Image (spheres, grey):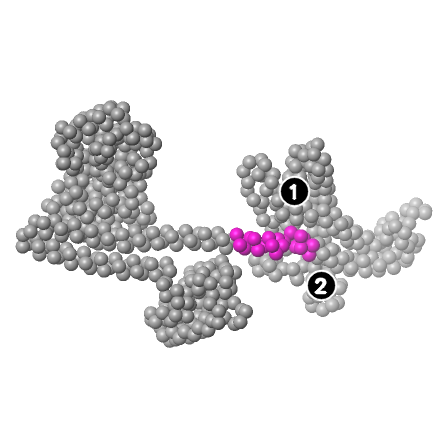
Amino acid sequence: MRVVIAEDSALLREGLVRLLEDRGYEVVAAVADAGSLLAAVAEHRPDVVVTDIRMPPTHTDEGLRAAAELRRHHPEIGVLVLSQYIETTYATALLATNAGGVGYLLKDRVADAAEFAGALERVAAGGTALDPEVITKLMRASRQVGGLGGLTPREREVLKLMAEGRSNAAIAEEMVISSGAVEKHVASIFGKLGLPSSESDNRRVLAVLQYLRA
Amino acid sequence: MRSKAGSRSREAGTRPAAVGGLRPAGGTTRAVFGTPFTRRAWRELLYAVAGVPLGMAGFVLTVGFLGPATVLTISLVGTVLGLVLLVTGLRVARLVSLAQQALAGYLLDVRLPQLPPPRPAHGVLAHVDARLRDSAGWRAAAAAILGLPIAVAKYIAVLWWAYGAFSVTSPVWWLMFRNHPAGRHLSPIYPGGFAVQTWPGTWPAAVAGAAILLAAPWLVRGVIAAELWLSRRILAPNDMTARVAALERSRSEVVNEAAALVRQIERNLHDGAQTRLATLALHLGMARDKLAAGGPDEVAAARDLVEAAHAGAKEALVELRDLSSGIHPPVLDNGIGPALQNLAASSAIPVRVTAHLPERPSPAIETIAYFSAAELLANAVKHSSANLIEVAATSPPGGPFVLTVTDDGRGGADEADGSGLSGLRHRARTVDGTLIVTSPPGGPTTVSVELPLHP
């Protein structure tokens, strides 16, 4: 899998390159700002991009805007956005059109190489990777208290993992339960929240997020 | 013709002595006999002529609005209309004051104090409230009302010119109208005065006219001087208003500075320690995975990663320490003296510190003094090529706290070139302190920061 990295801190950039190369990915370019990122993508056509949000020159949301542009012009390339903070508005902006091939994670997640690589794989394959923190924030801010209150603790856990973009198999593995049990929980959640059931993981993410934001 | 813009900017602020001041230029004789023929006298005459209708109109309009408005408002019958008229009257007074300012600026090259704009307000009631509390508007109204006697004075002064001009030319008039009907007299001064019956009789009248003409410009000038003095008195914000304006300005500086500082701290954390810790976590995570795998190559790689993580942790510590001592240096807890010693110890140029403070200043003052000293030391190291810097912190009994930083370098420090001096001045001003810079080319440079002991 071919990766382009954009991160303005040389230290962390090198760390990321090392981590990904160590796990057998091919890092074709590692750059320090959004302009170079777009150029590198045009040149190398990677499978997936990892980008910081705050980068030179303005140190505000360059990476986010670059991500939006990549998704518009190269929908086949997965974009994993890394950030020091979680802003639900950023998540909303990233997922505005569709949840396929996009991820938004806290930088903290690089501490767990396997999990980070898993998220990257998912995004590269056209799936979603939302930071658990985003979901927690959305659930806390959600006005659908009544709806969420009707869920059992187990179901809430499944809902969170589902919203992060995980497949049923991944949820089963995470929660150490059978796939069948996960499916039962999912069906029950959709029933209780009145959501249209969906086969695709991405649509499922969007449906849940929309519900939380409503 | 002299450059108007140039003279205006040059004279702004120091102008009062120039207009109306009786300052003979080049001998008393020339001052006495030349004055009616100077450009300035003509401009002043023109100003006085224009001032008569303006002053009258200003008075009539202002009183015309404010008088009935006050009666209506108080009567409670027409309060709403009264308030509307009051607000309109105040606005008219402001316009009159603006016209007055423009006239004085254009003809006399004098800058009258500008009225501060009224506070913006949303909603009808708030608007009315703001306008009624607008002290500048009321001052303009007072000026407009006083404009009546001034206009009368101007009128009389202008008449002097006219009579003088008429009288001095009366021999000519006599000849031109020699066939005037019997019994008609030509009198240089109306009413009464002396009646002229013969042509030679007009000669003394001409002499009298010349005298009047010589005096007229001085009269005009005197009236204008009195008017300008009054206008400045009335229109200029009083001490309290000026103080409020200064406080508002320094408050907004403080607020903005605080916000910028917080932003800077956030950025330093984000780009510094936070990134270092994320990288550290990344390295440790990888090391853990390697150790779990257990092969000899993996263990060697893990050692490498732990090495990197260890170095990263130490760097993060340094960074955090620098950042936190930049927010509040712990050494300040022991007082400004030891803190200055501490600063001196890390300076690239030798620093001698003397601190003599019978009373300890408030923490806020100490903090300002400390950061000022740090900035001044950094400036000196960067720009002065000095061999020695002296830092003194003193406080005479009952007096303010004075921090003085002197270097024997090349001097020429300029507040305008972004040396940070203006930032220090702002900071001092927030507690009513001052900053005095003496830095002649060639040195030495002395900067004194004077702060109250307790803000």
- Mark 2 Cα-neighbour bin, 10 Å: few <14, some 14–19, many ≥20: few
Q: Are marks 1 and 2 in contact (CB under 8 Å)?
A: no
Query: In the rendered view, would you say A8 is above or below B384?
Result: above
Confirm whether residue B138 shows in the render: yes
Q: Position of residue A198 (x, y in %)?
A: 21, 25
Number of dots carrying numbers = 2
- Rendered residue at 33%/48% (across/down): A58
Return the residue at label 1: B90
Q: Regarding mark 1 in the picture, which secondary structure is present there?
A: helix
Q: State which chain disc 1 sits on.
A: B
User: Which of B398 and B110 lies nearest the eye of the viewer?
Assistant: B398
- Rendered residue at 25%/57% (across/down): B316
Query: In the rendered view, would you say A126 is above or below B369?
Result: above
Give amino acid for label 1.
Answer: Leu
- Please tell me whether mark 1 or mark 2 is closer to you in this view: 1
Q: Which residues are magenta?
A: B229-248
User: Which of B443 and A157 lies nearest the eye of the viewer?
Assistant: A157
**Residue B237 sits inside the magenta stretch:** yes
The secondary structure that dominates the magenta segment is helix
**Residue A144 sits inside the magenta stretch:** no
Give amino acid for label 2.
Answer: Leu
Quadrant containing the N terminus of chain B is: bottom right
Return the residue at label 2: B22
